[in-house]
Image (spheres, grey):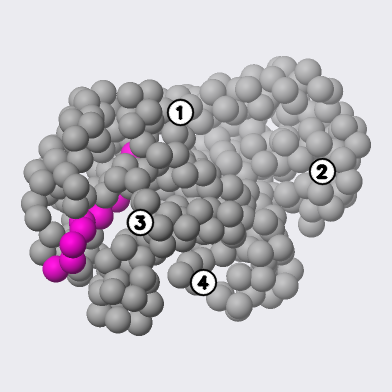
Amino acid sequence: MFDNLIGNDDTKALLQRLAVNGRVPQSMLFAGPEGVGKKLFAFELARMLLCADGGCGKCSVCSRIGVFDIPKPEKGEDYDAVFLSDHPDVGMVLPYRRNLRVGAIRELEREAHFRPFEADKRIFVINDAEKMNDSSANALLKTLEEPPSTTYLVLIASRPDSLLQTIRSRCQNIRFAPVPVSEIEKHLIAASRLSPDDASLAARVSGGSVGRALGLEINWFRQVRDSMVEVIRAGLMTGNISSMLQTSELMNDAKNKDRYEDTIGILESLVRDVFALSKGAERLSIANADIAKSLLELSSGATTEKIERWITEIEELQFNYLVNVNRKVATDGLFVKMARA
């Protein structure tokens, strides 16, 4: 049970104890950073609840749980559904773009009241639960308040504070922490055959997210990171707004639009490392330790007030991006503010 998942050993022990003692709450909120394995933990819990041997990982029940055939969406209505796994008693609700649609939550309410097909329980996972709007959240409340005795709900959220308090209060909160760098590094070397240097880099910049580390394209990352270092250099030393705006243009062209959030995340990571070094942090303690020498040089031109303003501006852009801000205008504005801070 949970043997194939890394990190969060305390959470593993808690879930195992709840399952063994028959005390698994019917409504749970799995809350923690993105990519630490919350959804995988949910499906492993489902195996523990539905498998006759408590989650053996080998039987037909275990092998079918978590296997989904999600069709490519053509329109929002395609996601007004509960997607069932190869096991008909395990389902999942997914957001369409940036929203969990109210139609999907209403369909979940209907499915939740069906009797189990094969097992004696049904488990439903609501992925990215923080993407519910007020209508979706209110539609879910009825099911949370009066869940059928055979139904278990697991809400997955990276930003649990974005959920309505009425939703959070009706769920047992299960906390997930970032996975230690050493564990991610070891896993990367074993699972993806990365070189030790590449595995170390991916683990350090992952923010404790196994999913992010596994999905990192090292060559792309290094290239983009170099361009973000130059943005910081321009903001701290040369004041070359023109070069910063050229970088903004590249970030927002068609071929890079799907990686915009990742690029801003790289910039934020570098800025935080510069800030840490300016405060006397050890080189090996920062995320981008492999370029610590260059960042230490940049930190010499950084004041606490300036870097704190930069971090605030970056966080504001990231928040506004969630509500469909014009990315090009926002990026230009961010870089101009960085140059003038």
- Tell me which label, 4 or 3, sits earlier in the chain: 4
Q: Residue at x 71, y 41 (%)?
A: 270
- Is 254 one of the magenta-colored residues? no
- CA neighbours of label 3 inside 10 A, class few (<14), some (14 to 19), many (20+): few
Depicted 130 relative to depicted 155: above or below: above
- CA neighbours of label 4 inside 10 A, class few (<14), some (14 to 19), many (20+): few
Depicted 241 relative to depicted 259: above or below: above
Image coordinates of residue 278 in percent, x first then y, are: 87, 33
Q: Which residues are magenta?
A: 118-129
Q: Residue at x 45, y 25 (%)?
A: 320
* Residue 161: assigned label: 1
- CA neighbours of label 1 inside 10 A, class few (<14), some (14 to 19), many (20+): few
Report the Cα–Cα distance between label 3 and label 2.
Answer: 52 Å
Report the Cα–Cα distance between label 1 and label 3.
Answer: 29 Å
Residue contact at pointers 4 and 3, CB within 8 angstroms: no
* Residue 22: assigned label: 3
Residue contact at pointers 1 and 4, CB within 8 angstroms: no
Q: Depth-wise, is mark 2 or mark 4 nearer the camera?
A: 4
Q: Is residue 14 left or right of residue 125?
A: right
Residue 192 visible from this viewpoint: yes
Label 3 is placed on what type of residue?
Gly
List the residue tagged with mark 2.
295
Report the Cα–Cα distance between label 1 and label 4.
Answer: 30 Å
In the picture, residue 191 is in which quadrant?
bottom right
